[in-house]
Image (spheres, rainbow, N blue to C red):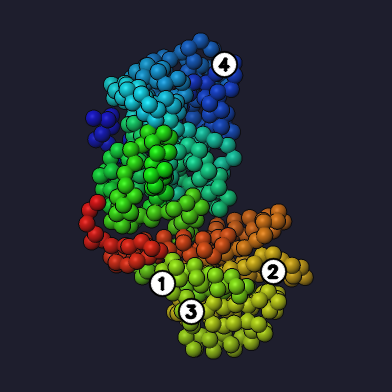
């Protein structure tokens, strides 16, 4: 039985996410190894706890006094970063008996390689004998902004409310950095590698119990305790879970076996798991991040989102957007006559359309420097005719009207509407040509909007796919069956 088997996940893994002291096994006295980089990241990120390098002969590592062995610790430490040769890891863990709660083993050469399972079994046996929980092996580390702990650079110190369990170290870095660019803020991220001891399900349970986390993301290639993951997700009724599953094809399963040694189950089982637990399955990293962003910004409604109104500049884009939302299971309905009459009364310039999509070319939108938008918001927002409003702006075109700040006025109007309690879900799509000056403005507007609780996407298709995830959770919580985004939602489906 693993150590701490009778304690809550929150208690068991608090030393991992909020360590008061950290031992680093594998830092070099003469070069820069993974252990050295980890110590440097800790210092740069502002970690305030005690750092204890462990080295068999060096007196100091990274300007810190070193100890010879975990057995020489003068008091127990919460967490150890272990990056030594695979065959040395069992001995390191054995030396931490009574001195260490959680070790994360970065080393490779275990179950992910041919003939490596025996070494992985030795690792687990040594950890159990020493009373230590082990995360990994074959991973990269943990990121916990509130504790000022990170294993990488160029990550934001701002704590958030998204918890991530990631079976891939490199993908974990992608999630942190690319997610930050989208405005995602994390409560924690842990790379779990081969999951020889601590399972992905246990970390999901930690985030489910943590008051610091509202949304859970999981990248996984395979699980050894599928029933526990199922039961954990099933018991979690309040926090949306987004799953990016690797190895859903024959070729992907072969790649996963050599990456983390995972025995990957059938794709049908994962679809069934999502169906029965209300988790959202994402197909790509971009979709995973965008769906997490939706749940960071928007609160699932009691009634599933169905009716979407599109507003923006660009007739062709509106047509493509209508297709994307229709394919994702939404209605883009014609607006009721009284709403059309109210919009017509605004005397929109020639070239505008007040049907759904509401299309106002940039040349028309410049009327009153773009201040037309808040009037449209007032009309449609209080109409009861929509569940979500998606505003799409061709930034390159709008910014070419340099004598007015149409884009700024549009975004400001959306922020004011959100602050005033705009009832339907509100999302923005800022489309650009990728030019640096346009992208810089997008970053500024994205930061303001996401901070205000408005998700921003690059394209309408991304918005549609991500809002479909929101709708799936809304439908599941409402106990409804339905085909949403190509996937069936049902509480009554048979167990996998």
Q: Residue at x 33, y 38 (%)?
A: 263
Q: Residues under labels 2 and 4: Cα distance?
A: 57 Å
Proximity of marks 1 and 2: CB atoms separated by less than 8 Å: no
N-term mark: 4 or 3? 4
- Left or right of 422? Residue 62 is right
Proximity of marks 1 and 3: CB atoms separated by less than 8 Å: no
Q: Disc 1 designates what residue?
A: 306
Q: Disc 4 designates what residue?
A: 29
Q: Disc 3 designates what residue?
A: 382
Q: Quadrant of the N terminus?
A: top left
- Left or right of 4? Residue 465 is right
Work out which residue is located at the far front of the displayed protein and give it.
Answer: 250
N-term mark: 1 or 2? 1
Q: Residues under labels 1 and 2: Cα distance?
A: 29 Å
Image quadrant of residue 385? bottom left
Q: Is residue 147 or residue 458 the one in the foreground?
A: 458
Q: Which mark is residue 398?
A: 2
């Amino acid at each position: 039985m693993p150590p701490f088997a009778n304690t809550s996940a929150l208690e068991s893994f608090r030393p991992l996410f909020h360590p008061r002291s950290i031992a680093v096994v594998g830092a070099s006295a003469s070069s820069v190894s993974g252990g050295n980089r980890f110590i440097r990241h800790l210092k740069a990120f502002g970690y305030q706890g005690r750092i204890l390098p462990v080295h068999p002969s060096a007196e100091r590592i990274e300007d810190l006094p070193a100890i010879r062995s975990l057995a020489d610790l003068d008091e127990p430490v919460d967490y150890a970063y272990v990056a030594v040769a695979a065959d040395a890891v069992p001995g390191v863990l054995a030396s931490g008996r009574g001195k260490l709660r959680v070790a994360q083993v970065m080393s490779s050469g275990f179950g992910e390689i041919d003939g490596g399972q025996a070494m992985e079994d030795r690792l687990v046996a040594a950890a159990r004998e020493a009373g230590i929980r082990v995360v990994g092996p074959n991973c990269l580390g943990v990121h916990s902004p509130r504790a000022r702990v990170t294993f990488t650079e160029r990550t934001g110190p701002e704590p958030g409310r998204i918890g991530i369990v990631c079976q891939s170290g490199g993908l974990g870095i992608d999630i942190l950095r690319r997610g930050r660019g989208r405005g995602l803020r994390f409560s924690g991220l842990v790379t779990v590698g081969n999951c020889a001891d601590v399972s992905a399900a246990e970390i999901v349970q930690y985030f489910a119990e943590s008051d610091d986390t509202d949304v859970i993301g999981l990248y996984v290639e395979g699980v050894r305790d599928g029933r526990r993951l199922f039961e954990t997700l099933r018991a979690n009724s309040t926090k949306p879970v987004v799953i990016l599953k690797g190895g859903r094809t024959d070729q992907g399963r072969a790649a996963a076996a050599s990456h983390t040694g995972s025995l990957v189950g059938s794709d049908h089982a994962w679809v069934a798991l999502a169906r029965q637990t209300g988790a959202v399955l994402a197909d790509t990293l971009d979709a995973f991040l965008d769906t997490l962003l939706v749940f960071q910004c928007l609160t699932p409604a009691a009634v599933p989102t169905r009716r979407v109104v599109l507003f923006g500049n660009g007739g062709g884009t509106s047509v493509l957007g209508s297709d994307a939302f229709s394919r994702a299971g939404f209605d883009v309905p014609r607006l009721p006559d009284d709403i059309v009459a109210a919009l017509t009364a605004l005397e929109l310039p020639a070239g505008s359309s007040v049907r759904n999509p509401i299309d106002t070319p940039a040349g028309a939108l410049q009327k009153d420097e773009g201040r037309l938008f808040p009037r449209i918001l007032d009309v449609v927002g209080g109409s009861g005719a929509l569940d979500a409003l998606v505003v799409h702006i061709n930034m390159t075109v709008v910014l070419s009207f340099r004598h007015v700040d149409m884009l700024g006025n549009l975004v400001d109007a959306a922020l004011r509407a959100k602050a005033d309690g705009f009832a339907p879900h509100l999302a923005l799509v800022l489309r650009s040509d990728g030019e640096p000056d346009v992208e810089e403005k997008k970053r500024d507007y994205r930061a303001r909007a996401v901070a205000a609780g408005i998700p921003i996407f690059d394209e309408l298709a991304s918005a549609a796919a991500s809002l479909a995830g929101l709708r799936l959770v809304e439908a599941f919580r409402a106990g409804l069956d339905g085909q949403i985004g190509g996937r069936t939602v049902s509480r009554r489906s048979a167990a996998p």
